[in-house]
Image (cartoon, grey):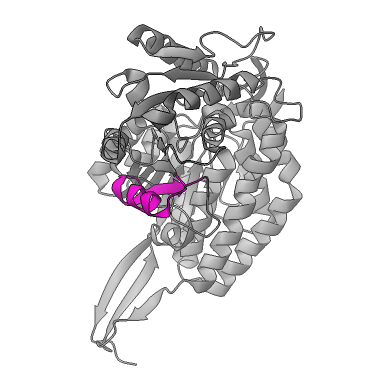
Amino acid sequence: MLDKRQFYIDGKWVNPAKKNDFEVINPATEEAFAVISLGGQEDTDAAVAAARTAFGSWQHSLKSDRIALLKSIQTEYAKREEDIAQATTMEMGAPITLSRTQQVGCGTSHIQKFIDSLEEFEFEEVLEGFPNEKILKEPIGVAGLITPWNWPMNQIFLKVIPAIAAGSTCVLKPSEISPLSAYVFSEIMHAAGVPAGVYNMLNGDGIGVGSQMSSHRDIDMISFTGSTRAGSLISKAASDTVKRVTLELGGKGANIVFADADAKAVKRGTMHVFNNSGQSCNAPTRMLVERSYYDKAVEIAVATAEAHSVGDPSLEGSHMGAMSSEAHYNKVQSMIEQGIKEGARLVAGGMGRPEGLNKGYFVRPTVFADVTNDMIVGRDEIFGPVLAIMPFDNEEHAYELANDTDYGLTDYVQTQDPDKAKRAARAMRAGMIRINGDGGAAPSPFGGYKQSGNGREGGKWGIEDFCEIKHITGWTN
């Protein structure tokens, strides 16, 4: 059993104020493999105090020094990639191949993009035509960062790196379900020479440390990624101190497949839903197919699901791993059952574990056809490998169905007509639109409309989220 009960506060590893052990479960074996501590108010106060003290000097650090620090973190991260991959596979069930490429790769990609963005970032500007008026972008202060279990490194890098790049200090609370990768990340930060108190990490659950951070008077900002329900609770808890709250929440992405889509469009969209066992907020889980192509699309989706294997995450390969926890496994199972009860046509997968797997939180790749937007499986985020397919009659109908949702994170369109693709991209109410499988490569904003959250992560937008804007008049050079 791995003992990871310490917290990283003020540049050193410290014991929790009180004993409150929590076992970390390997979702593929259903067995505990590590123990962490869940922090309390005294631990939260200590981490916040360290960040508040460090902010006094870090806010005045030179941009060149911050860039040098990010490059040092980048160097140390490269040394620990396999440790991160192994931790991710054990704690949340991602196949080791996916952990090494996508899970670890998120951090590698994000830090380089933030270095590039910071090099170009202007913290001061004079308003054009008004030489005596100046705009400053100053660090917001102490940021509380609460990250989820599904893409641990992705969300840690999207929050920690821009916070310190902006000159803010931070306290990270990773998910108690996937805390081991954050533990390795903290070791990386220490080895990289991050000044004491600039970065702090303590474990805890949402009811405990999460709530304490959200309402803490000495935290200036909360950046949260997780469910829409939890995001709403955090916003309420933060309201008494009127702190900034940025939220990256759920999604129920629409994937509009026109009859003139390329031959791989349906398979590509179906595989995307199954990636990371369906545990991605930006997954295209609603496939809207032009009626003339509908039957063929269902046939392709079924064949894709039936050919997609599920198995041991510790083995290399392109198979699907496990759900993150027993609670989440049970939720996905109940949603599949709900779809059957609602009358959606189950064409692949279904309830229970895949054949040959009698242990572990494994779910069968599942496809429902003839789904409607008034069904729960057509409206609610399932966060599992479950695809809902529905037909549309024309462009207007497709956009109406796509926008008939509480969410607005990532939508997709598949067509070989460039003008139609542009019309679709403009018509869909979402923070990100992906045309014909293009995932993008530039430092770009990640975030959504409506109940998918507010604020943007990534690139210059991610750095700006951790800044305050100051307008100065009467400035003379």
Q: Is residue 218 above or below residue 64?
A: above
Across and down, in percent, residue 103 comes to 62, 40
| Displayed quadrant of residue 335 | top left
Total number of numbered labels? 0
Image quarter (top left, top right, bottom left or bottom right) of the N terminus: top right
Q: Nearer the viewer, residue 199 or 273?
A: 273
Across and down, in percent, residue 67 comes to 58, 68
Across and down, in percent, residue 9 comes to 56, 46
Q: On the rendered structure, is 67 left or right of 169? A: right
Q: On the rendered structure, is 365 left or right of 133? A: right
State whether residue 176 appears in this view.
no
Region rendered in magenta: 415-437
Q: Is residue 270 above or below residue 161?
A: above
Image quarter (top left, top right, bottom left or bottom right) of the C terminus: bottom left
Residue depicted at 32% across the width and 25% down the height: 379
Whether 410 is among the magenta residues is no
Q: Nearer the viewer, residue 93 or 75?
A: 93
Q: Is residue 216 above or below residue 278?
A: below
Residue situated furthest bottom in the rendering: 477
Whether 435 is among the magenta residues is yes
Residue situated furthest front in the rendering: 292
Across and down, in percent, residue 454 comes to 33, 47
Q: Nearer the viewer, residue 443 or 12?
A: 443
| Displayed quadrant of residue 133 | bottom left
State whether residue 111 appears in this view.
yes
Residue depicted at 55% across the width and 44% down the height: 154
